Image (tube, coloured by chain):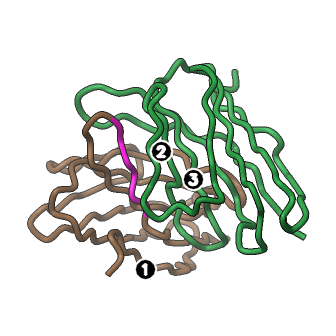
Amino acid sequence: RKEVEQDPGPFNVPEGATVAFNCTYSNSASQSFFWYRQDCRKEPKLLMSVYSSGNEDGRFTAQLNRASQYISLLIRDSKLSDSATYLCVVTFSGGYNKLIFGAGTRLAVHP
Amino acid sequence: DAMVIQNPRYQVTQFGKPVTLSCSQTLNHNVMYWYQQKSSQAPKLLFHYYDKDFNNEADTPDNFQSRRPNTSFCFLDIRSPGLGDAAMYLCATSRTGTGAYEQYFGPGTRLTVT
């Protein structure tokens, strides 16, 4: 079983749609959680951290359920510029931060 | 303005011909990482430096080596590239402390093996 699992997609949605991505992780000792965004042939960039209480950044909402080992990302009012691959990431702290990446969910927003 | 710089951006090498990829950072972060990412796959950590301490992932092939001569620079050496080593190689940095800190990625070096 992969440490971090995501639906690869692609999710094809029209502009303005709401889309949700899910992610599960296998190691209950995981301590920190993130969503990264990766554009085609570019490097990953941090989109947002994910906190147990849930957090929102503009059109983006992230949720964490530690009991179910489940993370979600909700994008409201999708824009063309949201088209990218979204990587679910967990980490174990302790001197350095080893990021464990999911393979990513591809989002394509069309006019 | 650039924080994590990788050179070259594109590298073509021949099967079996040693190649070195470089990474530099202006963030003064003490941890530097090398990842390998193949098409449609997750980035895979190869190794990292915590200051001068080298930490290899258990499944990283011996073909991959790294050097960190100072805080700012880190190199990835592939001693005998095979066709399966064609990938994007990403360098990242982070600082340390309590809690988890963001990793800053360079733009990557896309390696082609002919």
Q: Which residue is mark 2?
A: A46
Pointer 1 indicates a residue of which chain? Answer: A
In the image, which residues are magenta? A96-101
Alpha-carbon span between mark 2 and mark 3: 16 Å
Residue at position x 80%, y 38% in the image: B7
Image height of A2 relative to A94, above or below: below
SS label for mark 2: strand
Q: Please provide percent x and percent y for residue A3.
A: 32, 70
Which label belongs to residue B35?
3
Q: Please provide percent x and percent y for residue B63.
A: 65, 59
Chain B's colour is: green
Chain A's colour is: brown
Image height of B10 relative to A4, above or below: above
Q: Please provide percent x and percent y for residue A74.
A: 36, 62
Q: In screen coordinates, is B6 left or right of B34?
A: right
Quarter of image, res A12: bottom right
Q: Which residue is mark 1?
A: A7
Magenta portion: prevailing SS class: strand
| Tags 2 and 3 both on a single chain | no
Q: Nearer the viewer, residue B74 or A31?
A: B74
| Mark 2 in CB contact with mark 3 (< 8 angstroms) | no
Image height of A7 relative to A77, above or below: below
Residue at position x 59%, y 59% in the image: B62
SS label for mark 1: loop
Is residue A25 highlighted in magenta?
no
For the residue carrying disc 3, how many other residues have a C-alpha within 10 Å: few (<14), some (14-19), or many (20+)?
Answer: many
